[in-house]
């Protein structure tokens, strides 16, 4: 048996949703943590484990649906569970024979009565606890909550385990005392969804929640349970998440506006995004840094260079502390700083930041990615303005080679790079353009540009 620390490391490294049943059956931290959270109604822990609860419930449902498909005859299944319960819990069941109870857990049972009894024989109880053997009858001919025979998925196949899903209801049919060995047999029947005593309330609650499993519906359920403090916590969380989603919408609209050169509108949405993120996140959060970066980009396009550099420098300070050195978001900020300094004719700083952006993109992106082409083109423009024409042409050719692989020949970005090359060729008096036979006004860039 692996210790819990080893299990946690294994879980973080290898857990997948299709292994949920195996993980639940494993004698480790997970099933104990989940059952304790369910038993104690620890809503924070249950919320943290919601992905696993969902995976496990779906896995049981999938196995149950498979069982129904392959089963030629729907049959009645009898399963067993040995458990120690308090005398108060036993008395509650004794007082409610022929009524319904719910088990606030995934109910682990066995087809083998001896396996269930062995759990009782291996446990000691104090004077307030009672040995109970649950005998559960499952009539698969009726519409019932899913159950799954998990023998082939379980870590302990010999236990012949059957797992009944969370939220199932059981009718207490009979309770028999066995004074000779001090245990009780509690005979249960897995309730049908159509039981007339349950259907009305079930339908009402389902309509109340409306199959909408959100923080809003969770808050509503907690309110109805009288768990007002927990409800407040999740409503506050929903407000936070809603604000973050609104900020993301502003960022997306801003980028779209920037893409169509509507820089005034882009700036408006970038600033709205920044305001929300600063109110909801830490000042040094990476997303706040991205917002500063985009505000700086829009201001740069508007010619507001002082304000642009203020925002870009804030972005750089945050991003260099919070992001990896190879972050593409950091590369985007470096690229925008390059554009800002290029606009200010500070060619040395422009080349420095364009080179930083290029270095990151080369390490992270595919070699023919358009952003690498843009970075080469930006460096080419700086070098051209600094009159380093040969090196500028080298970068321009690399930019064009990438652009022609991923863009149509008449794409505006391709045309701009061709125009840059023509201009540099003319200035440097280097002839590398060949007229076409069809139209002397058009040019093809041929092998002298390093292209096939």
Image (cartoon, rainbow, N blue to C red):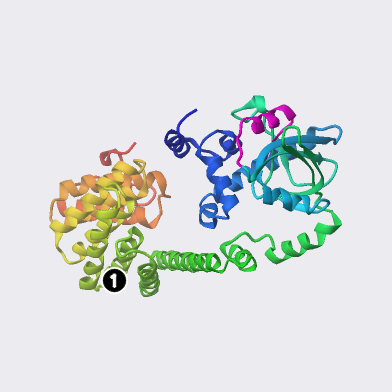
Horizontal and vertical percent position of residue 240: 46, 67
Question: Tag 1: Cα neighbours inside 10 Å, few (<14), some, or many (≥20)?
Answer: many
Q: Circle 1 sits in a helix, a strand or a loop, which is it?
A: helix
Q: Is residue 443 left or right of residue 89?
A: left
Q: Is residue 50 left or right of residue 277?
A: right
Horizontal and vertical percent position of residue 312: 25, 64
**Tally of marks:** 1
Q: Quarter of the image holding residue 220?
A: bottom right
Q: Nearer the viewer, residue 323 or 21?
A: 21
Horizontal and vertical percent position of residue 101: 74, 52
Q: Please state, as top left, top right, bottom left or bottom right, where the C terminus lies in the image.
A: top left
Q: Is residue 337 magenta?
A: no
Q: Is residue 209 left or right of residue 344?
A: right
Residue sitting at x 68%, y 64%: 209
Q: Is residue 220 left or right of residue 28?
A: right
Q: Is residue 123 magenta?
A: yes
Q: What is the residue that sits farthest to the top in this orientation?
A: 158
Residue sitting at x 22%, y 71%: 305
Up-down: is 23 above or below 91? Answer: above
Q: Nearer the viewer, residue 385 or 252?
A: 252
Residue sitting at x 74%, y 30%: 113
Up-down: is 180 above or below 377? Answer: above
Up-down: is 24 above or below 352? Answer: above
Horizontal and vertical percent position of residue 323: 30, 52
Is residue 222 visible in the rendered image? The answer is yes
Q: Nearer the viewer, residue 415 or 236?
A: 236
Is residue 437 visible in the rendered image? The answer is no
Q: Which residue is mark 1?
A: 299
The range drawn in magenta is 108-126
Up-down: is 86 above or below 203? Answer: above
Q: Quarter of the image holding residue 31?
A: top right
């Amino acid at each position: 048996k692996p210790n819990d620390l080893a299990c946690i490391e294994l879980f973080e490294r290898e857990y997948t949703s299709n292994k949920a049943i195996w993980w639940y059956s494993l004698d480790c931290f997970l099933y104990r943590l989940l059952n304790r959270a369910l038993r104690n109604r620890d809503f924070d822990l249950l919320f943290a484990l919601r992905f696993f609860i969902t995976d496990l419930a779906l896995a049981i449902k999938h196995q149950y649906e498979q069982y129904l498909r392959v089963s030629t005859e729907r049959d009645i299944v009898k399963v067993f569970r040995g458990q120690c319960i308090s005398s108060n819990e036993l008395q509650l069941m004794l007082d409610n024979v022929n009524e319904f109870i719910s088990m606030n857990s995934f109910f682990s049972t066995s087809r083998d009565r001896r396996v269930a009894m062995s759990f009782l024989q291996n446990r000691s109880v104090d004077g307030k606890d009672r040995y109970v053997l649950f005998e559960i009858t499952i009539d698969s001919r009726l519409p019932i909550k899913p159950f799954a025979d998990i023998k082939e998925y379980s870590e302990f196949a010999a236990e012949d385990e059957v797992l009944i899903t969370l939220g199932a209801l059981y009718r207490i049919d009979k309770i028999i005392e066995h004074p000779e060995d001090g245990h009780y047999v509690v005979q249960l029947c897995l309730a049908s969804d159509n039981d007339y005593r349950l259907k009305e309330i079930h339908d009402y609650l389902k309509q109340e929640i409306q199959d909408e499993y959100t923080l809003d519906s969770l808050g509503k359920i907690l309110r109805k349970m009288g768990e007002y403090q927990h409800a407040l916590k999740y409503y506050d969380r929903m407000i936070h998440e809603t604000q973050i989603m609104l900020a993301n919408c502003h960022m997306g609209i801003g980028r779209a506006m920037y893409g169509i050169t509507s820089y005034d509108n882009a700036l408006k949405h970038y600033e709205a995004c920044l305001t929300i993120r600063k109110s909801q996140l830490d000042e040094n959060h990476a997303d706040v840094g991205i917002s500063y970066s985009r505000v700086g980009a829009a201001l740069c396009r508007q010619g507001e260079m002082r304000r642009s550099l203020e925002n870009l420098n804030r972005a750089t300070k945050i991003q260099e502390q919070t992001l990896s050195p190879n972050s593409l978001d950091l590369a985007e900020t470096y690229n925008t700083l390059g554009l800002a300094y290029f606009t200010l004719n500070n060619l040395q700083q422009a080349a420095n930041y364009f080179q930083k952006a290029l270095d990151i993109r080369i390490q992270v992106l595919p070699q023919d990615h358009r952003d690498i082409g843009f970075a080469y083109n930006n460096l080419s423009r700086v070098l051209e303005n600094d009159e380093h024409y040969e090196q500028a042409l080298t970068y321009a050719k690399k930019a064009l080679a990438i652009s022609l692989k991923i863009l149509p020949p008449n794409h505006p970005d391709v045309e701009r790079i061709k125009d840059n090359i023509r201009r540099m060729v003319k200035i440097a008096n280097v002839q590398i353009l060949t007229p076409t036979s069809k139209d002397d006004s058009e040019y093809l860039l041929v092998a002298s540009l390093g292209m096939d």
